[in-house]
Amino acid sequence: MRVGPGRQGRGYPRERKMKRTLVVAALCIGASLCGTAAAQVKVLPIKGAGSGVPAKLYAESADRILPANVTYRAVGDEPARRAFLENVPESAGETRPPHFIATESVLTSAEIHAYNTVHAKQIGALVQVPVAGLAIALPFNAPGGTLDLSVPQLCRLFSGKVEYWNDLDPGRAGVVTVVYRAEKGGTTELLTRFLSTACSRMDTEGSRLVGGTFRTTRDFASLFSALPTNFVAAASEQAQYDRILATAGAIGYSGPDIAAPLSDPTRVAKVRGYSPDDASVRATLNSIAPPTGSAAERPENWVPTYSYPPVGYPIVGTTNLIFSQCYAEVWEAMSLRVFLIPHYARRNDAAVTAHRFIPLPSAWAEAIRSRFAVAGVPTGLNNPSTCAGIGRP
């Protein structure tokens, strides 16, 4: 099968003669087969790449939720997106694009349209779905007991208007160092989505923010005409957390799977009285229902966004999976399905919770399972009719 060029003028590789020993297993269509008998069949390796936020949950721990044949590398959000969406595998340190990517950001309508315009007819539609909910934590390294920040204080902090700890808390002293992500990433998107909605112009007036306000972005440094002098960059999720721990007076933002207990307000800040592991986060995740009808036809609607919840811990989002509907090699689709079916049947909830993520609401899990994970519906992974003669090579 010949596939058209990517957005960078580069086509998908054809030179792949893979073993077909798994055809019977890969033809699994029903949820019962995929979740039981097929899960016991040996399958060939497939690769995922992306954000460091779910890396321990996916692959770097004994209770990893990806099947043993599925590898995952935390190469970062931007390199993975380029490798998958633009067919530039070198950006993720690979020789071919990953089979799927993970991110906490949401693909925009423009990104989805560009991908589908070039690739949908040859390799199938793009799918993005949430895997688990999460709260963005605010780890810090400043002695002085509990830290509970108001929303206006957060706005001033991340806009660069706070230089000293006693501007936030009279019981603390010293210079504040804000550690941000140097690379484009989903945690930055979730934080800035909250800030862009929650912060008033009065909160950010006099800052170096472009236009005087926050906006939703994956690129933290791009918010500023010139970065505040007390802001320092870190190259990855783990590097950011390590920098906070190693720097007296530092504070930053991260995913939930960190060393510090999320319920310890002497190490992870509360916001308006709530810790990031508060039950209110689950309530926020339940506040948006999965799309139905014509709205369900749009991939961008399959990742919910939470800008500024009226109550509870306010910086909330999801970690997401992005993959193709169609794969030329049926065993590749099978490998994905062996993960998707059990996951959206809630069989990974214990591991998800152990890594401080939040299992998806039941309505979301069932909607994703029934629309994308099974093959027996037109929108399903490697549906025989929809994907006839096409597929990601």
Image (cartoon, rainbow, N blue to C red):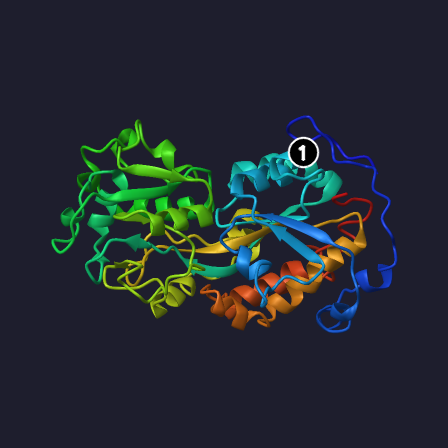
Q: Is residue 231 above or below residue 101?
A: above
Question: Can you identify the residue that label 1 sits on?
Answer: 118
Amino acid type indicated by mark 1: Val
Does residue 163 sit above or below 10 in this rendering? below
x and y, in percent, of residue 255 in the image: 43, 55
Q: Position of residue 268 (x, y in %)?
A: 31, 59
Where residue 116 sits: x, y (%)? Answer: 64, 39
Residue depicted at x 62% and y 64%: 369
Which residue is farthest left? 170
Percent coordinates x, y for residue 60 in the rendering: 57, 59
Q: Is residue 309 left or right of residue 256?
A: left
How many numbered tags mark residues here? 1
Observer able to see residue 133: yes
Q: Is 21 displayed left or right of 336 in the figure?
A: right
Closer to us: 199 or 257: 257
Quarter of the rendering occupied by the C terminus: top right
Q: Quadrant of the N terminus?
A: top right
Say which of 364 and 22 sits in front.
22
- Please identify the quarter of the rendering in which residue 98 is found: top right
Who is closer to the viewer here, 219 or 108? 219
**Which of the 4 image quarters holds residue 81?**
top right
In the foreground, 144 or 340: 144
Name which residue lies at 78% across and 44% down: 390
Please give the name of the residue rendered at 38% of the width and 38% of the height, measured from the top-left corner: 233
**SS under mark 1:** helix
